[in-house]
Amino acid sequence: MHAARPTLSRLELRCPPLPQTLVEAMKLLNRPDQLEVKPITRLVERDPVVVARLLQIVNSAYYGLRRTVSSVERAVVLLGPVSVAGIIVGMHMLRLRTTLPGSAMACFNRLAQHCQATAFLARHLLETVLPRLSGQTSVGFTAGLLHDFGKIILIYNFPHEAVGFYEQQRLQNEVQASDERHLEQLLFGCDHTEAGEYVARKLNFPDVLVDVIRYHHAPHQTPATSEAYMITPAVAVADLVARTMGYAFTHPLTPEQCLEHPAWRLLQQRYNLTDWTPRSLLTHLQEQQEFLDQHVQHLSLPNPPQRNRRVLSTTHD
């Protein structure tokens, strides 16, 4: 893990200028156990766009509330301050696109859609299937939002090369590699998990988020002592499923390709999921397609992807 440090230092990776509200939300997320309703409410109320989106989210069909919520403070109470802090982070991450050249905008927008979808699916998985992490669902949502933070860093530092790589897949056509991260190392000098971890540590992200950024492609490597030990398999699975539900960043997956990934078995082992197979878990998440689309639309992500939906049969285990 630390062998890449000298290379990363020489690369002098820069982080795009972060909005002040994003910085403040990240500081609050550093203390999730002490996060209270009032400071998060004040943070939301400073931005009318965030207010509008927060009220749309809490009043969406996903939450099934009987009465419309019009109070920001009530919305924060219902969603939980950590979850709302995650929503603030997600919305302000979208605003980083203004720091990118126009040629990178479409690339960034699609990455943002993928991260929003991963966050939604990770939260749903933790809420409905993995009760052992009932107190970690909001952290899982934020971790899903930020799991590909390293790709934002690479797009910001190498916009021309990144667009060629992620949008036009130039290097993939010339070099055979089974892992996209290996191609990133060839092109950028590091892969997106290394770049994300390096910059996230410099910015003092919470350790749990740093470890998800670093290990979401290899959740089995997450140290057992890490707060992210139980979260990385859930984010890894959510990442895979997002790619089957119309929110892939680079490589869409068929359900069968998705199910081949070892993250499913790891999730079963760590949570002792005797009542769920990978296939039934995938079907369970796919049933959230309507709510997932609504969630992404509420966050005003432009150019919704054209989906070729594949409904997975539930007749086989």
Image (spheres, rainbow, N blue to C red):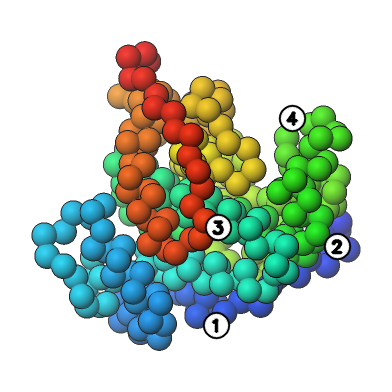
Task: Indicate the amino acid at tag 1.
Answer: Gln
Q: CA distance from mark 3 to mark 2?
A: 24 Å
Quickly name the residue at label 4: 178
Q: Which mark is on residue 11? A: 2
Residue designated by label 1: 20
Query: Disc 2 versus disc 1: distance between alpha carbons?
Result: 26 Å
- First in sequence, mark 2 or 1: give its number: 2
- Above or below, comparing residue 190 to residue 108 in the picture: above
Disc ID at residue 112: 3
Query: Marks 4 and 2: which is nearer the front?
Result: 4
Quarter that holds the C terminus: top left
Q: Quadrant of residue 93?
A: bottom right
Horizontal and vertical percent position of residue 39: 36, 82
Residue located 64% across and 50% down the image: 214
> Can residue 114 be seen?
yes
Q: Nearer the viewer, mark 4 or mark 3?
A: 3
Position in image of residue 28 (x %, y %):
45, 74
